[in-house]
Amino acid sequence: MDDRERLALLTAPGGGFPLVRRSVGGVALEVFDRDPRTLREAFLATRRHADREAIVYRDDRYTYADQWSIVVTLAHRLRDKLGVVKGDRVAIAMRNYPEFAFTFWAAQLLGAVAVPLNAWLKAAEMTDLIRETAPKALFADRERVEQLRGVDGVGALVGVRCTEAPLDYTDLLDLDHPLDTPPACDVDPDDVATILYTSGTTGRPKGAPGTHLNHAASLLNKLIRAVSPPDRPGGKPLPPAPSVKLLTFPFFHIAGINNLYSNAYSGHRTVLMYKWDAPEALRLVEAERVGEMSGPPFVVQTFLAAAATSERDLSSLRSLGMGGAPAPKALIQEIHEIFGGRVSPRTGYGLTETTSGVFAISGADFVAHPDSVGRPLPTVEVRIEDGTGHAVPAGAEGEVALRGPQVVAGYYRTASEDNFLDGWFRTGDLGRLDADGYLYLVGRLKDVVIRGGENINCAEVEACLATHPDVVEAVVFGLPHPTLGEELGAIVRLRTGSTTDAASLRAYAAERLAAFKVPAKLAISPIPIPRTPSGKIIKRHVAAALDFDRLLTDTV
């Protein structure tokens, strides 16, 4: 059966993932009628995995029983020592340490709101977000403690794997006196569970308050992709066998948080890294028998480059996922060639505002539709809109609008009317739906340069430059022009040893694009183009960050 038939069986009454209509914020939505309905419930369910390993980080190994004891004890300490109660914010600013997961879960047991902060923000940027959310407690590692010492608006600063903070994590936890019974708390699906901040590639990061319903819908949609339909009428769906997953997304990214709770609910072992390092990832795949790895395309790209010449035993690997940025078609073929078709490529589409992925595609389906991000997952409504908010026909391009229980209600303390209306979230992404329901992204609504009245889709030009065999990555943006209003600028990075120059790249683009789409100014950068930890190019800063004018001089 194809994927649509499989999902239809699973979401039918008795299929394990039944659907019902429910009013959410005054809008009737299709939701899953099954547990877990909150992240607290999701954590409580992990006790059934007690003997399995939950988290591996370097030499630290934690079973689910270990995690249970730590999280339950920490939840009591947060309440009794720091006064954290339901609705209070608990901020987390650190690398992907196991303590991140423990703190996140402890907050959920209390009905508190976890606020994962981008660990790579500058002190001033992070301070703004801290003051906006006013956390009762902030858990931070050494680098962040040094940045945030003395910041007002924090009830308690707790140092993780460092002794420089006013309060030490291990002292607060006090595992000499562990507790086993979670603190009592009534958590409702409509309660806010997290505030995650958008990556801010085109402006200041905005907080997206995610409810327990949002996260539960996202968790169940991840689970439904991994289970098999009942093998007989009235039977139960077959859950996925516990696997080992190497996590490369940072926990402060929605994909990282989604993996955190989805892996735990299913009893998978999550392998963490201090930072991305392709040779170390190969070692971990071999040593831990990793079955699944996912990350931004540039992470997968560097992993494949290392795997192509490695003698490591990678036979356990079954799936390589790409998310956070568009996946180049060449990567799909490269995965097939390096692993001989044994490893399934997959990707999808989602945003912070949709609580991770809402479209998905994998395996042979992905190979057959390499330009697509897949079909919508259960409970997800999609339409392509024109500039007036009306749906356009299949095949026509417009703004992607999404609705469903995964979609947040609006932004935290920020005007949301332009993006959220009647339950619909207008993503700012341009796309088209084909007759079979596959979504194809074609660019950003606001990532358009208007040159003399002609609209230029930056993603189209970037994609063209990226097909040149010597180009590793490219970014295209608008530059002010005295008469045209704007003209197109571009920065590219070339493969080591390449002798390609700017003139030949512009000629290459001119052969494939209309003349007005060819970058008027093109510079070659010797260093990688700045990206967020989720793999997105930081458009608003790229020209200044790389000193575009100097690069132009060097290029010439």
Image (spheres, grey):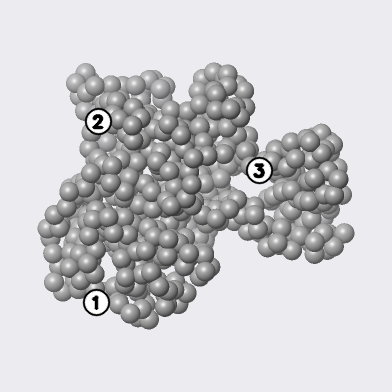
Location of residue 543 in the rendering, given as x and y in whole percent from the top left corner: 71, 58
Q: Is label 3 in a helix, a strand or a loop? A: loop
Asked whether the residues under the numbered discs 1 and 3 touch, taking CB atoms below 8 Å apart as contact, a structural biologist would say no
Q: Earlier in the sequence, mark 1 or mark 3?
A: 1
Q: Nearer the viewer, residue 49 or 136?
A: 136
Quadrant the C terminus occupies: bottom right
On screen, 364 above or below 165?
A: above
Q: CA distance from mark 3 to mark 2?
A: 39 Å
Residue at mark 1: 171
Location of residue 293 in the rendering, given as x and y in whole percent from the top left corner: 44, 48
Residue at mark 2: 33
- Say which mark, if any, is on residue 531: none
Q: Earlier in the sequence, mark 3 or mark 2?
A: 2
Q: Label 1: few (<14), some or many (≥20) within 10 Å?
A: few
Q: Label 3: few (<14), some or many (≥20) within 10 Å?
A: some
Query: Disc 3 marks which amino acid?
Result: Asp
Location of residue 537 in the rendering, given as x and y in whole percent from the top left corner: 61, 52
